[in-house]
């Protein structure tokens, strides 16, 4: 017996006039309702930046309302209004705002592709925040425009002891040099001087990551990969995460990461390394096939899933491994069977069971 799901009423978009009236209302609940309608798809936010700014001022004590406002401001597409929207977001990026509001403000900068001058001190502080999500979103926002904030970024980094460094902050410092040879040399010399006498975590890893961005062909990527095999789990995982953030600049670290993967039975490390190798687009010839098959045969479920990603990336080249996947499938949980069933299809062109079996189990 099946029960029909209730038909949900269609949300009708508000007109510009309705949104304007709601955003400027004297009643808080009405303003929040208007903000919620402003983040609907195709809402005419390009015509409402001034009203959103006034609404932000009226909703200062409500972090939920401010989050909605930040999302709406980040949706502005009209070039002539983006700077205004970014200026309003700058007021939501300060440390006085709730963490979630600052995260959405940083995301808004990333969506708009610009950070106003008044916001750079706040974005630079975000890069040192204890919350990893805020740091990562702030770095994403800063990455394409870091040269514009170079002076502020350098000042904030210089005023922060190396034992408080983060990979995101040092990444922004490296990016702020742009393509200037002099700028990159200054950052490199500063990082090297500051690293003297510092511990690997966090200073050394953050510094190596910055140096890798400045010179991917230098020794820094390999140094980070070596740290990925460190005895201390926190240090190793931090190095792996730093490599993952490097993108294409992290490719020279692949051989070292492969060695780290071969040498460890730690599920946290294996999962992190596998995902990083996938992000770096490891070449088929670099995949440690024997180790990957061993772990698919014998490893815990989460490790099997992680190594399956490596086979999946180059499934056309690893078709001969399908029997190993089939053997593990026969002794796996339903959740893992779903992963292995899809992998077997990618490797051999055939499923081990109807995919619908796993769709049913998931519901």
Image (cartoon, helix red, strand yellow):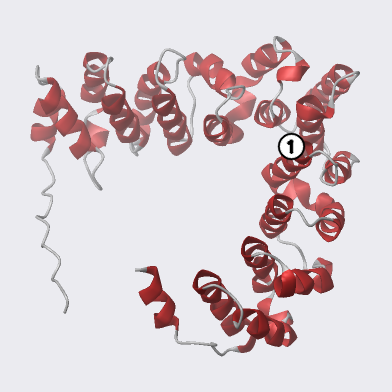
Horizontal and vertical percent for residue 290?
Answer: 83, 73
Q: Residues within 10 Å of mark 1 (few under 14, many from 20)?
A: some
Horizontal and vertical percent for residue 32?
Answer: 18, 28
**Viewed as shown, does residue 233 lie left or right of 34?**
right
The reply to whether residue 284 is in sight is no
Horizontal and vertical percent for residue 105?
Answer: 42, 28
Horizontal and vertical percent for residue 266?
Answer: 75, 53
Q: What residue is rendered at 45% in x and 87% in y?
A: 354
Q: What residue is rendered at 41% in x and 28% in y?
A: 100
**Viewed as shown, does residue 148 lie left or right of 179?**
left
Which sits in the foreground, 67 or 5? 5
Rendered position, 259 above or below 67: below
The residue pinned by badge 1 equals 234
Q: Quadrant of residue 112?
A: top left
Quadrant for the C terminus in the image: bottom left
The reply to whether residue 288 is in sight is yes
**Viewed as shown, does residue 280 lie left or right of 285?**
left
Rendered position, 335 above or below 178: below
């Amino acid at each position: 017996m099946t029960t029909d799901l209730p038909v949900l009423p269609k949300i009708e978009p508000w007109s510009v006039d309705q949104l304007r009236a709601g955003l400027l209302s004297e009643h808080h609940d009405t303003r929040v309702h208007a903000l919620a309608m402003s983040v609907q798809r195709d809402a005419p936010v390009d015509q409402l930046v001034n009203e959103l700014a006034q609404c932000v001022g009226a909703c200062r004590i409500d972090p939920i309302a401010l989050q909605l406002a930040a999302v709406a401001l980040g949706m502005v597409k009209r070039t002539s209004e983006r700077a205004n929207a970014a200026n309003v977001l700058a007021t939501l990026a300060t440390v006085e705002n709730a963490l979630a509001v600052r995260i959405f403000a940083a995301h808004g900068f990333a969506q708009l592709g610009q950070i106003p001058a008044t916001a750079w001190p706040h974005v630079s502080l975000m890069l040192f925040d204890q919350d990893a999500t805020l740091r990562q979103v702030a770095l994403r926002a800063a990455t394409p425009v870091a040269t514009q904030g170079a002076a502020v970024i350098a000042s904030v980094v210089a005023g922060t002891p190396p034992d408080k460094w983060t990979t995101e902050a040092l990444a922004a410092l490296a990016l702020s040099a742009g393509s200037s040879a002099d700028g990159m040399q200054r950052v490199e010399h500063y990082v090297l001087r500051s690293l003297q006498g510092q511990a690997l975590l966090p200073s050394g890893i953050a510094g190596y990551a910055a140096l890798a961005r400045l010179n991917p062909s230098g020794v820094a990527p390999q140094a980070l990969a070596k740290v990925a095999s460190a005895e201390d789990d926190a240090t190793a995982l931090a190095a792996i995460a730093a490599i993952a953030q490097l993108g294409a600049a992290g490719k020279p670290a692949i051989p070292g990461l492969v060695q780290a993967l071969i040498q460890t039975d730690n599920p946290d490390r294996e999962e992190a390394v596998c995902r990083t190798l996938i992000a770096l687009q490891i070449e088929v010839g670099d995949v440690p096939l024997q180790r990957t098959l061993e772990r698919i045969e014998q490893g815990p479920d989460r490790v099997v899933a992680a190594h399956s990603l490596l086979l999946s990336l180059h499934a056309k080249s690893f078709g001969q491994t399908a029997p190993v996947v089939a053997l593990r499938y026969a002794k796996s949980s339903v959740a893992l069977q779903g992963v292995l069933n899809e992998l077997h299809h990618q490797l051999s062109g055939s499923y081990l069971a109807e995919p619908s079996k796993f769709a049913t189990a998931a519901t």
